[in-house]
Image: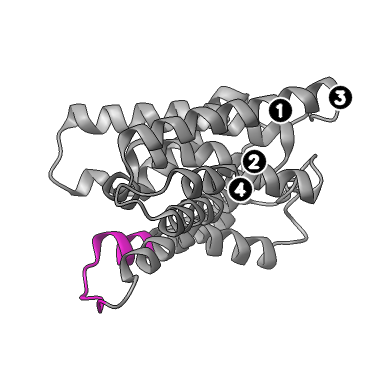
C-alpha cells in the first residue's frame, strides 16, 4: 500500500514553523544573556532539523531517503569542504580585527545552514522525488519561503516577490547539489552563501562587505572544484532521491 506523505509533511512543517515563530517573531519575551542572539538564531534554524528528525523517526518504515550528511564524499573530504568558510573568516577576521570571532561567526553560520538543510533538502525534497525536478524545487521553495515569515513584517508585495525569487533560485541550485552529492553538508555549503552575503544580520554587522564577498568567492571555487572532481570520478548520483 502506498503511504500517504501529507501527514508526514504536515508534522514536519508544523514543528519547523513553531520554532520559526517563537525564535524569529518572538511573540513572547525571551531573556537576554551572553551570546543569546546566536543561541536564538540557531534555535530559529533548528525547526527544520528537529522536524525532519521527528518525522524520519516516526515514519522510518515508510520513508526512503538516501541523503546522508556526507553523501558521496568521505568524512574527511566533506568536513574540509564544510569548514572552508570558517577557516577563511578566521584568517580575515571581523571588522574589529578579531580572528577568533571570525572563526566563531563562520562556525555559527555553517551550523545554522546544516540545521536548515537537514530539513529542506535532507528530508522534504525527497518527499517530492516523483515530481519533475523543477516542480520539486518549486514546492520546496514555497515551504521554505513560508517558513521565513518575512511577509508578516513591514514589507511590500514587490519585496516579497524578490525574496521568493531568490529562495526559488536557491532551491534549484542547492537542490541540484543535494540530488547529485546526496550530502546534507554539501547542500549546507551552498545554503550559507546567501546568509553570508546578505541575510545573516550577525555576519553583516561584524564582517566587512569585502570579507564576506571574498570568503564566498573562494569557497564557491573550492566547492565547485570538489564537485567536478567527484563528477569526473563518476561518483555523483543522477537518480532522484
Of the image marks 1 and 2, the number of the one nearer the N terminus: 2
Residue 217 is situated, as x and y percent measured from the top left of the image, at 49, 27
Residue 131 is situated, as x and y percent measured from the top left of the image, at 63, 29
Q: Do the residues under discs 3 and 4 have CB atoms within 8 angstroms?
A: no
Q: Which residue is mark 3?
A: 234
Q: Is residue 183 visible?
A: yes
The quarter of the displayed image where residue 20 is located: bottom left
State the CA–CA distance, disc 2 to disc 4: 11 Å
Q: Which residue is mark 2?
A: 186
Q: Is residue 20 magenta?
A: yes
State the CA–CA distance, disc 1 to disc 3: 11 Å
Q: Which residue is mark 4?
A: 83
SS for dot 4: loop
Q: Which residue is at a point 25% across and 76% down the rendered structure image?
A: 32
Q: Which residue is at a point 59% across and 58% down the rendered structure image?
A: 52
The quarter of the displayed image where residue 178 is located: top right
Answer few, some or many: residues within 10 Å of disc 3's Cα (few below 14, many 20 plus, some between 14 and 19). Answer: few
The quarter of the displayed image where residue 208 is located: top left
State the CA–CA distance, disc 3 to disc 2: 17 Å
Amino acid at each position: 500500500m502506498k503511504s500517504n506523505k501529507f501527514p508526514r509533511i504536515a508534522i514536519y512543517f508544523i514543528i519547523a514553523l513553531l520554532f520559526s515563530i517563537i525564535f524569529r517573531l518572538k511573540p513572547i519575551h525571551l531573556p537576554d544573556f551572553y551570546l543569546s542572539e546566536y543561541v536564538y538564531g540557531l534555535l530559529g534554524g533548528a525547526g527544520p532539523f528537529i522536524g525532519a528528525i521527528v518525522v524520519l523517526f516516526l515514519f522510518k518504515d515508510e520513508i526512503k531517503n538516501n541523503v546522508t550528511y556526507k553523501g558521496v564524499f568521505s568524512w574527511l573530504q566533506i568536513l574540509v569542504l564544510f569548514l572552508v568558510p570558517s577557516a577563511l573568516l578566521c584568517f580575515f577576521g571581523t571588522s574589529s580585527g578579531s580572528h577568533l570571532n571570525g572563526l566563531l561567526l563562520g562556525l555559527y553560520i555553517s551550523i545554522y545552514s546544516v540545521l536548515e538543510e537537514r530539513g529542506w533538502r535532507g528530508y522534504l525534497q525527497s518527499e517530492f522525488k516523483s515530481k519533475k525536478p523543477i516542480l520539486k524545487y518549486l514546492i520546496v521553495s514555497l515551504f521554505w519561503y513560508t517558513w521565513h515569515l518575512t511577509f508578516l513584517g513591514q514589507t511590500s508585495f514587490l519585496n516579497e516577490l524578490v525574496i521568493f525569487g531568490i529562495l526559488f533560485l536557491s532551491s534549484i541550485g542547492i537542490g541540484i547539489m543535494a540530488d547529485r552529492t546526496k550530502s546534507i553538508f554539501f547542500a549546507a555549503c551552498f545554503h550559507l552563501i546567501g546568509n553570508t552575503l546578505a541575510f545573516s544580520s550577525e555576519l553583516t554587522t561584524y564582517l566587512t562587505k569585502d570579507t564576506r564577498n571574498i570568503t564566498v568567492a573562494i569557497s564557491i571555487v573550492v566547492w565547485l572544484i570538489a564537485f567536478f572532481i567527484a563528477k569526473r570520478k563518476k561518483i555523483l548520483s543522477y537518480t532522484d532521491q
